[in-house]
């Protein structure tokens, strides 16, 4: 599969491009079935979320959170919010299993980094058993700063 960013000048049609869009309550409602399919593709047990979790309003959630579409199909998303003046927390970050390792997660993360002011600390939790995600975050400059029963806490200052 070829992946193109929304800024691509390639002659491919828009249907062949990767498109990153800002999350909205309407897109969540419209794509809830796809969101559940993406969640179920995970190798790791995710905390179960229902539509109310996804629609729960948090500070700057609708500005910071993103959906990734490829050929108009939802293939991943990141949900985050502003915790305080200098901290953004990633609550949920997942790419459909068969679309991983194609740079989609990197593009979603870059959209968040571009959105927040310099000096912002981005935090997240990752399951201790999820070595693939740990490797991804560490390659992106996140460092482990705390540990819980089943999770590591990571942060990156942008």
Image (cartoon, rainbow, N blue to C red):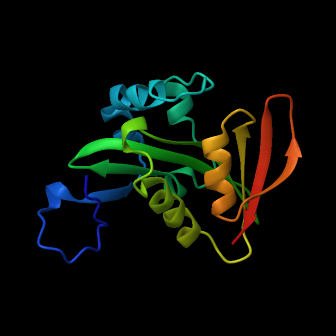
Answer with the quarter of the image where residue 64 lies: bottom right
Image location of residue 108, percent across then percent down: 47, 57
Image location of residue 50, percent across then percent down: 51, 22
Quadrant location, the C terminus: bottom right
Image location of residue 70, percent across then percent down: 27, 50
Task: Kindly identify the residue that appears in the image at 31 percent across and 66 percent down.
Answer: 5
Above or below — where is 59 with respect to 147? below
Task: Kindly identify the residue that appears in the image at 69 percent across and 58 percent down.
Answer: 138
Q: Nearer the viewer, residue 129 or 69?
A: 129
Answer with the quarter of the image where residue 28 lies: top left
Answer with the quarter of the image where residue 96 lies: top left
Q: Nearer the viewer, residue 85 or 17?
A: 17
Above or below — where is 149 with respect to 7? above
Task: Kindly identify the residue that appears in the image at 55 percent across and 62 percent down.
Answer: 112
Image location of residue 29, percent across then percent down: 36, 32
Above or below — where is 119 with respect to 38? below
Task: Kindly identify the residue that appears in the image at 67 percent across and 41 percent down.
Answer: 131
């Amino acid at each position: 599969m070829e992946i193109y960013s929304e800024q691509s000048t390639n002659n491919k049609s828009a249907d062949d491009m990767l498109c990153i869009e800002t999350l909205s309550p309407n897109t969540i409602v419209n794509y809830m079935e796809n969101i559940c399919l993406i969640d179920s593709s995970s190798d790791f047990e995710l905390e179960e979320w229902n539509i109310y979790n996804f629609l729960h309003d948090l500070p700057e959630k609708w500005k910071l959170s993103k959906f990734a579409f490829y050929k108009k199909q939802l293939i991943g998303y990141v949900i985050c919010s502003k915790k305080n003046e200098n901290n953004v927390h990633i609550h949920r970050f997942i790419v459909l299993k068969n679309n991983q390792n194609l740079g989609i997660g990197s593009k979603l993360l870059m959209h968040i980094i571009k959105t927040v002011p310099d000096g912002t600390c981005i935090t997240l939790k990752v399951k201790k058993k999820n070595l693939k995600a740990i490797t991804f975050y560490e390659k992106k400059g996140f460092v482990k700063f705390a540990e819980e029963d089943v999770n590591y806490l990571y942060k990156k200052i942008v």
